[in-house]
Image (cartoon, grey):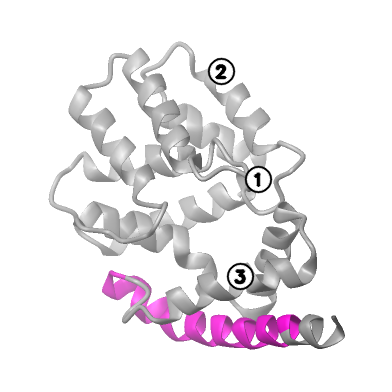
Amino acid sequence: MDLDALKERFFRLWHFSDAKQVIWNDVIARYGEKHRFYHTLEHIGHCLTEFDIARKYLTLPRATDWAAIEHALWFHDIVYSTTSSGNEEKSAEYAYRELRGMDMPVLFCDQVKRLILVTKLHLPQAPDEEVMCDIDLAILGQPRLRFSQYEEYIKFEYGVEPHVFSAGRAKFLVGMLKRRPIFSTSLFQHAYELHARANMALSLHQCEIDVDMHENAA
């Protein structure tokens, strides 16, 4: 999804706001920060593509759920720093503030905030949260080349020594592989579960090799 398509989609979503151009400019600036390689507008575009598929094939309890998810996807990484543990909280507050500033209902704003916060640990407790998490994790089940590129981009964002990154990455991968299943909805399970497990198992093996090589060389 190119920048023009993203802008058109954002303006359509924010049709109710006279400030949509100002907000869009901030979205571009934040997702274009120099320290970002994966958490960019390209990631948002991929999420929106997955969102469109999910909306076509899945059913949610409330008509407003899909709108809340789409708003949450746009803002779930609006604040991103690898040295901060509060990215999701800050992103959720940003989204809440902008939506309330446009007089959107409190319940809707609360839902968007909740959907962003659930991406911190990806442990959904409600149907809308399941869809949100599955979309955000869909990168794990992509073809091997794209998955490898994603991991390289994450490594660039952290900017630490390779063995340090591999040790931290291994913990994440072990935690994800312990989940049964990784994806919550049948749609994403069928599409990505097996690919995600294969991708992460291979990545974990490489991380373990990297850590062992560093320890043996020390």
Horizontal relation, residue 87 to residue 159: left or right: left
Q: Secondary structure at mark 1?
A: loop
Q: Residue at x 46, y 35 (%)?
A: 91
Quarter of the image for residue 168 reads: bottom right
Q: Are marks 1 and 3 in contact (CB under 8 Å)?
A: no
Q: Which residue is mark 3?
A: 169
State how far apart marks 1 and 2 are (Cα): 17 Å
Q: Main secondary structure of the magenta part?
A: helix
Tell me the number on the disc at residue 167. Answer: none
Which one is in front, 126 or 16?
126
Q: Which residue is mark 2?
A: 21
Residue sitting farthest toward the left: 61
Q: Earlier in the sequence, mark 1 or mark 2?
A: 1
State how far apart marks 3 and 2 are (Cα): 37 Å
Q: Nearer the viewer, mark 1 or mark 2?
A: 2
The question of residue 206 being in magenta is answered with: yes
Q: Nearer the viewer, mark 3 or mark 2?
A: 3
Q: Which residue is mark 1?
A: 2
Q: Amino acid at mark 1?
A: Asp
- Segment tinted magenta in the rendering: 184-211
The question of residue 138 being in magenta is answered with: no
Q: Secondary structure at mark 3?
A: helix
